[in-house]
């Protein structure tokens, strides 16, 4: 019998066009602005946006949490520009090689070493965008809830970014 898993499902509406929200997910400059929960920063974001490509991000904790860095890669499995991004999330070392959740310093039981993630953007009639995100593979409700809390904080930062700044061309 397969192990029971739990999903994180989050829906959020942004007062920004779908192109702006897509850029937040796919442009390194934007990723550095919102990746990580409140108080965390993202000093590194690299994007190879294609099926078989990957996004590499580094999250840095605030000084009062020790300033540790946590690296992750998002191995892209499917992409439909401005609508769909599917990827496999992996904890990684500084070189981008996959490591286990425990090697990454994750204290919570039930956090998978890798998980399938899906981001779906929907253009709303009023120029706004709805985001539906699913993260799969958590083996405890506590790990799922911890991840949901962090994701919600990330999306709060994303909302502040995309609702305050218009679409800009990549550097």
Image (tube, rainbow, N blue to C red):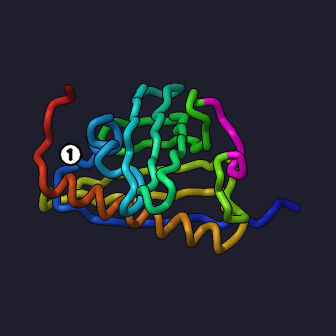
Q: Is residue 98 magenta?
A: yes
Question: Residue 131 vs residue 148: left or right?
Answer: left
Q: Is residue 82 above or below residue 63?
A: above
Q: Residue at x 48, y 34 (%)?
A: 56
Question: Residue 66 vs residue 121: left or right?
Answer: right
Q: Quadrant of the N terminus?
A: bottom right
Q: Which residue is mark 1?
A: 20
Image quadrant where residue 135 sits: bottom right
Disc 1: CA contacts within 10 A as few (<14), some (14-19) or many (>=20): many
Please state the extent of the stretch shown in magenta in the rendering: 97-103
- Residue 168 in the image: state x and y as whole percent: 14, 36
- Residue 123 in the image: state x and y as whole percent: 24, 53
User: In this view of the protein, which residue sits in the foreground, 5 or 143?
Assistant: 143
**Disc 1 secondary structure class:** helix
Q: Is residue 80 above or below residue 166?
A: above
Q: How many marks?
A: 1
Q: Residue at x 50, y 67 (%)?
A: 148
User: In this view of the protein, which residue sits in the foreground, 110 or 36?
Assistant: 36
Q: Residue at x 49, y 26 (%)?
A: 53
Q: Quadrant of the C terminus?
A: top left
- Residue 33 in the image: state x and y as whole percent: 29, 47
Question: Residue 157 vs residue 53: left or right?
Answer: left
Q: Residue at x 61, y 57 (%)?
A: 136
- Residue 159 in the image: state x and y as whole percent: 25, 60
Image quadrant where residue 92 sits: top right
């Amino acid at each position: 019998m397969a192990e029971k898993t739990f999903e994180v499902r989050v829906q959020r509406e942004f007062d920004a066009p779908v192109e702006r929200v897509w850029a937040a997910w796919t442009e390194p400059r934007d990723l550095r602005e919102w990746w990580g929960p409140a108080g965390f920063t993202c000093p590194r974001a690299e994007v190879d946006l294609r099926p078989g490509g990957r996004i590499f991000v580094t999250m840095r904790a605030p000084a009062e949490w020790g300033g540790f860095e946590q690296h992750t890669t998002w191995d892209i499995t499917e992409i439909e520009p401005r609508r769909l991004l599917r990827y496999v999330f992996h904890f990684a070392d500084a070189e981008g090689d996959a490591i286990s959740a425990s090697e990454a310093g994750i204290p919570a039981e039930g956090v998978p070493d890798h998980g399938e993630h899906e981001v779906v953007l929907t253009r709303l009639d009023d120029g706004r965008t709805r985001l539906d995100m699913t993260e799969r593979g958590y083996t405890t409700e506590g790990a799922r809830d911890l991840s949901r809390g962090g994701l919600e904080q990330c999306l709060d930062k994303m909302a502040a970014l995309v609702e305050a700044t218009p679409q800009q061309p990549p550097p």
